Amino acid sequence: MPIEDTLQTWLGPLSGDLPRLYLVGGAVRDHLLGRAPRDIDLMCTEPEKFARRLGGRHGAAVVAFTGKTEAPCYRVVSRSEKGSFIDVVGVLGGSVEADLARRDFTFNAMAMRVVSAGELSVPIDPFGGVADLNARRVRATGPGVFEADPLRIVRAARFAAELGCVVEPITLGLMQSAAPGLTKTAGERLQRELELLFSHPISAPHVRMLDAVGALETILPPIRTMRGC
C-alpha cells in the first residue's frame, strides 16, 4: 500500500486537527525508492499526547516503546488489523534539522512534512540523502557517527547489501577508525544486525568489506586463526 494511503487511513479521522508532523527515517528512504516502508515513524513535539489521541480515535493500543530511539517513542497498534502499527517519536535537539543531524546515514536523515492526512511535502534533506540514494551511496552524516554507536558499522554493510549501495571512502575510513568500539556493543544487537546482513543473498562482498575495515575480527576474534585454512 502506498504510504500516502497508509497515512490517510491512520490520520484521516484527525484531518483538520493534526499537529505539525513529520515522516522521518527509513520510511522516507523507502518511500523515495518506491518501496513500501516496513515501519512508519511520525515525529512531533508532543508524541505521547498525539499517540493517545490517535489511538483513542482508532480504538488502538498505545505502548511506550523505549528501546527503539533515544527520543520518546509511542507505538500505536491496531486491534483490528494484525501487524498494523505506527510509531510516534519526539524531536531530539530542539528542531527537525537537529534531530536529523543525530542520525546515521544521509539517506536515513531526511524528513517529509505531513501536509495533510494523505499528503507529504518534498523531502527535508540537509545532508544530501536524495543524491546519495540516487547514486546508491552509503555516506555517514558526520565524523562522529560510528563513535556514537559502533553498531552502525555493521548497519552500513547491511544497508549496502539491501539497497545495492557502495560505502563511500570517507565513511569507510570512519568505520575502520571506530571498529575497535564494537567490543563494547551488546551481543544481542550485533547478532540481530549480522543476521539481517547474512540473510541477504548478496551479503558476501559486504562481509568482506567488514573484514577490510577490521570489524569482523573485532566481532569474531577466532577468525584471526582461521585465515589461510
Image (cartoon, helix red, strand yellow):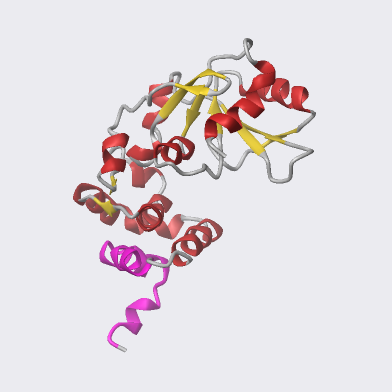
Where in the figure is residue 111, as x and y percent of width and height?
43, 28
Residue 12 left/right relative to 210: right
Q: Where 219 falls versus 63 (above or below)?
A: below
Residue drawn at x 76%, y 27% as measured from the top left: 58
Q: Is residue 72 visible?
A: no
Query: Residue at the bottom extreme?
Result: 229
Q: Where 142 falls versus 157 (above or below)?
A: above
Magenta-drawn segment: 203-228
Quadrant of image for the C terminus? bottom left
Residue 7 left/right relative to 58: left
Residue drawn at x 40%, y 33% as measured from the top left: 102
Q: Is residue 120 visible?
A: yes
Question: Quarter of the image holding residue 62?
Answer: top right
Residue drawn at x 73%, y 45% as measured from the top left: 82
Residue drawn at x 33%, y 28% as measured from the top left: 125
Q: Is residue 210 magenta?
A: yes
Quadrant of image for the N terminus? top right
